[in-house]
Amino acid sequence: MQNSGNGKNTEHGLASKVLKRGNAWIEYRTMGSGPGVVLIPSLGRGAEDFDLLATDLARLGYRVVQPEPRGIGGSSALNKGDALNDMAADIAAIIETEQLAPAVLVGHAAGNWVARVLAHDRPDLTRAVALVAAIVTRTPSDDIRASISGSFDPSLSDAERLAHLERAYFAPGADARVWLDGWWPDVARLQREAARQTTDDNWKPVAHAHSTLYLGAANDIISPPPTLNELRSAIGPKASLKVIPQAGHALLPEQPQAVTDCLHEWMSELSPVEGDDTADD
């Protein structure tokens, strides 16, 4: 593995880097110092969705990593036949390069697939897992799936796409225009194909092996938050549940402070990482 950095620094030490893994390049950003946290974005969306959260977590004393999904920015596209395991291996390489193990993995929506696969494939790199607005107990209806696809269909007008975004991703009254941009349809197609290529389901019950937070959105119609019993039945007994009001599946742009507060509170209660001097802060 080869790493190169062309970082522009801020008060939190923001650095943009590129890692070579095999024949592929993986772009990512790092910020802050302390226990490692890796932020994995949703289907067809990039690392920028986590910018506010990353800054807040760095300020609170975490070392935050934002991998850019394959096909976005400086990250090479997924190859035909790649599975979720290959996507997870990219992030494993970053964790090892940055010496962040064990790290907390935070997967937003479809990003939770990658987080859970990584926790299964590389438990040595995983401290705990947070599933943010994730589908674990229910699947969307066909009409909601149509709105998911319509949200990033470039053949539709902005008005049509906005209607799909408002319906599928945002709570009533929220400004869905913030998500008109930032979609990568070809990336979403390849990520869905990678999910179909992943035939081993042993990664799904992540909370049997790892402390797991399900951070739900009260108005999420794509993945309505389960009950705690439903959650633990689906992913294991080490699962906990928090639900943020006045938010839909997008969650991050709707309630950024609430997301920060919930994650920080939960991570503060995890068993300390060996050698972590911030555990009692």
Image (tube, helix red, strand yellow):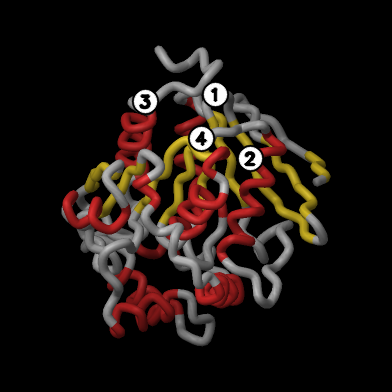
- Whether pointer 3 and pointer 1 mark residues with C-beta atoms closer than 8 Å, the reply is no
Residue bearing mark 2: 95
Give the mark nearest the N terminus, 2 or 1.
1
Q: Nearer the viewer, mark 3 or mark 4?
A: 3
Residue bearing mark 1: 34
Answer few, some or many: residues within 10 Å of disc 4's Cα (few below 14, many 20 plus, some between 14 and 19).
some
Q: Which mark is residue 268?
A: 3
- Whether pointer 3 and pointer 4 mark residues with C-beta atoms closer than 8 Å, the reply is no
Give the mark nearest the N terminus, 3 or 4.
4
Q: Position of residue 45 (x, y in %)?
A: 52, 62
Answer few, some or many: residues within 10 Å of disc 1's Cα (few below 14, many 20 plus, some between 14 and 19).
some
Residue 185 in view, yes or no: no
Q: Is residue 140 left or right of residue 97?
A: left
* Secondary element type, mark 1: loop
Give the mark nearest the N terminus, 3 or 1.
1
Q: Identity of the amino acid at label 3?
A: Ser
| Name of the residue lying farthest toward the bottom | 155
Structural distance between the alpha carbons of marks 3 and 1 = 12 Å
* Secondary element type, mark 4: helix
Give the image quarter of residue 8: top right
Quadrant housing the C terminus: top left
Give the mark nearest the N terminus, 4 or 2.
4
**213 versus 170 height, above or below:** above
Q: Identity of the amino acid at label 4?
A: Thr
* Secondary element type, mark 2: helix
Answer few, some or many: residues within 10 Å of disc 2's Cα (few below 14, many 20 plus, some between 14 and 19).
many
